[in-house]
Image (tube, rainbow, N blue to C red):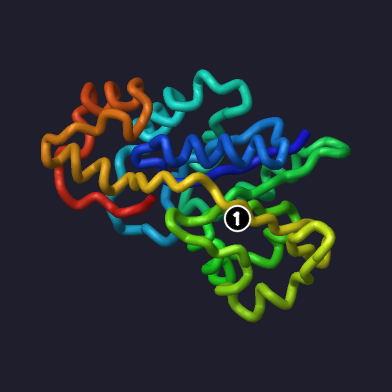
Amino acid sequence: MKIGLFGGTFDPIHWGHLRSAEEVSETYGLDRVYFVPASIPPHKRGKTTTPAKDRLQMVRLAVARNPRFAVSTIELKRPGPSYSIDTIRAFASQLGKGDSLYFIIGLDAFIEIGTWQDFKEIFLLCNFIVTSRPGSKENDPLRGAGVAVKKLFCYDPKQANYRHQSGNRVYFIELTDIAISASEIRALVRQGQSIRYLLPSLVERFIKRRRLYRGAGRVRES
C-alpha cells in the first residue's frame, strides 16, 4: 500500500485541506491518507488552540465519507510536543513488505524542515509530497531549503523530482488554488459572519453546537 500522512492542527479542518488531500491521493495513487491532528505543535507551544477532542471530532466528521481518508490519533495520545519524526517512525515500523510512506507537507513548512527534530532521519523513512501555496507558481521545492537539506538530494530529470540518498523522493505538486485559511474561518465566527461553503456542513454545525471560536486569541495557521 501507498500510505500518506497529512498532519496539522486542523483548527478547523476546511475544504482547502480536503481538496489538497484528494488531489495528492489521486495524483500519486495513494491507497490511504491519514489525517493526523497535532496535540502540541512544537512551533506553537504556549499559544491557544481549540481542545484536541473538538479538533479530532471535526476531522472525523470531515473525512467520514471518503473511503481513502482516515484519522490517526497517534499524536493526540502521545504526551508532549508533536514531533513529526515520532509519528513517521511509528508508521514506518508498521509498514509491510512493499508498502511505502508519503509525508504530505506544504511548501512553506518544507522550506523550514532543516530546523525540525531529527530531520535527516525523516528523509530515510519516507517520501515527501510538497504542496504549493495558494497563488504560488513555485516548481522547485528545494529552492528555499537550507544547504544541509539540499546536499541530501540529487535531481532526477527523467522523473522530474528529487531523489534522496536512501532512494526516497521529494515530489512537488501544484494544487488547485483554494485560498481558505483556518484563521479566517475563526475570525468570521468571532464576527458573527457566515462560514458556509468554507468547510463541510457537518463541521459547520459542530462549530455552532460547541460554540467554538467565539473568544479571542486563537493561533493562525492555514
Q: Of 59 and 38, which appears nearest the observer?
A: 59
Q: Quadrant of residue 208?
A: top left
Residue 215 seen in this snapshot = yes
Residue 114: x %, y % from top left: 58, 71
In percent of the image, x 41 and y 44: which residue is there? 178
In the orientation shown, which residue stands out farthest toward the bottom? 147
**Number of numbered discs on residues:** 1
Q: Of 74 and 99, which appears nearest the observer?
A: 99
Residue 77 seen in this snapshot = no
> What residue sits right under mark 1 in the picture?
130
In the orientation shown, which residue stands out farthest toward the right? 97
Query: Compared with residue 49, is residue 139 higher up or lower down, i.e. above or below?
Result: below
Q: Is residue 33 left or right of residue 99?
A: left
Quadrant the N terminus occupies: top right
Q: Is residue 162 left or right of residue 105?
A: right
In percent of the image, x 72 and y 36: which residue is there? 29
In percent of the image, x 28 and y 48: which residue is there? 183
Query: Compared with residue 144, is residue 33 higher up or lower down, i.e. above or below?
Result: above
Residue 158: x %, y % from top left: 84, 60
Residue 87: x %, y % from top left: 61, 47
| Neighbour tally class for label 1: few under 14, some 14-19, many 20 plus, Cα within 10 Å | many
Q: Of 23 and 90, which appears nearest the observer?
A: 23
In percent of the image, x 30 and y 41: which residue is there? 50
Query: Compared with residue 62, is residue 38 higher up or lower down, i.e. above or below?
Result: below
Residue 188: x %, y % from top left: 19, 41
Dot 1 falls on a residue whose secondary structure is strand
Amino acid marked by disc 1: Val
